[in-house]
Image: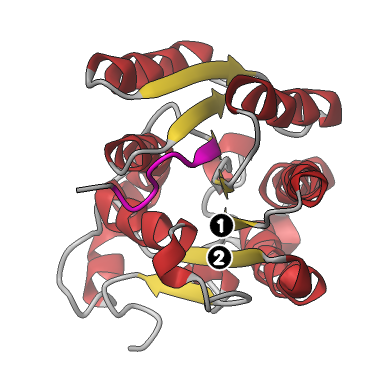
Amino acid sequence: MAGLLEGKAALITGGARGIGRAAALAFAREGARLVVSDLLAEGAQETVAMINAGGGQAVSVSGDVTKPELVKAWVDTVVKAYGRIDCAFNNAGIAGNAVGAQGKLTSDWSEQAFDRMIEINLKSVWLCMRDEINAMLADGKGGAIVNTASIAGLVGLETSSAYVAAKHGVVGLTKTAALEYARKGIRVNAVCPGYIVTEMTREPMERKGEQIMARIPFGRLGTPEDIAEMVVWLCSDRANYVSGAAFNVDGCYAAA
């Protein structure tokens, strides 16, 4: 039985660990051929090694997702390796602790920390989409793009000012691109993870884990695989009438 992504060529950013690695493994399981990127070169290589050891097909690339020349090179790598790009998961991102802003209120953020958060969590998504869309337009067969937003793209979160701004921006960018390219057969959606068991949530769970858990009706954190399954479906032909949407995968957090 063919997988949901059988024969499709895909790019996944932020694929060294967590949600990105889970998605890469799920894509490969469903028959996709992959290019996996991450700033953490060794982690991306490990993800690719896992895929290839399991009979899949993947190559790794590395570098800073905010560098336009690198992003274009990654998209070109997909096209050169597999003849086209059918789908992409723009997943690379950081949390407040990566810019020294953990636990800080809006007026306490430094301008440098705010700018870096926007650059990585929002601008890089646009950079990826720009080259992915252009490659899909050149091929003329459409495609599917999924961007990692967050529940922070739907609601406010205290002490996460620039992160919330960036993720709201990702949702808006997703909806706009979906409208612009619908007639070209390019679908664009966002996935909005809640609190997931990853390195990114370790610090907030240590700082206010009891408060967070009290807000999650499911009574547990999500897993990277919970997100990966949604992304696989959105990139598959089974979601061929779905575009411009932001999907919560959050244990009912945003509904509470």
Q: Position of residue 10 (x, y in %)?
A: 54, 38
Please report the residue visible at 57 percent of the width from the left and 40 percent of the height from the top.
92
Q: Using the rendered image of the protein, determine whether residue 200 is visible from the camera's viewpoint.
A: yes
Vertical side of 17 occupied by 8: above or below: below
Instruction: Give the image quarter of residue 250.
Output: bottom left
Report the front residue among 200 and 191: 191
Vertical side of 133 occupied by 100: above or below: above
Residue at which label 2 appears: 190
Vertical side of 154 occupied by 145: above or below: above
Cβ–Cβ under 8 Å for marks 1 and 2: yes
Task: Please tell me whether residue 234 belongs to the stretch shown in magenta.
Answer: no
Query: Is residue 161 left or right of 192 when viewed as pictured?
Result: right
Residue at which label 1 appears: 146
Q: Position of residue 108 (x, y in %)?
A: 71, 56
Count of labels in the image: 2
Query: Between marks 1 and 2, how big is the CA–CA gap?
Result: 5 Å
Q: Which residues are magenta?
A: 3-11
- The three-letter amino acid code for the residue at tag 1 is Val
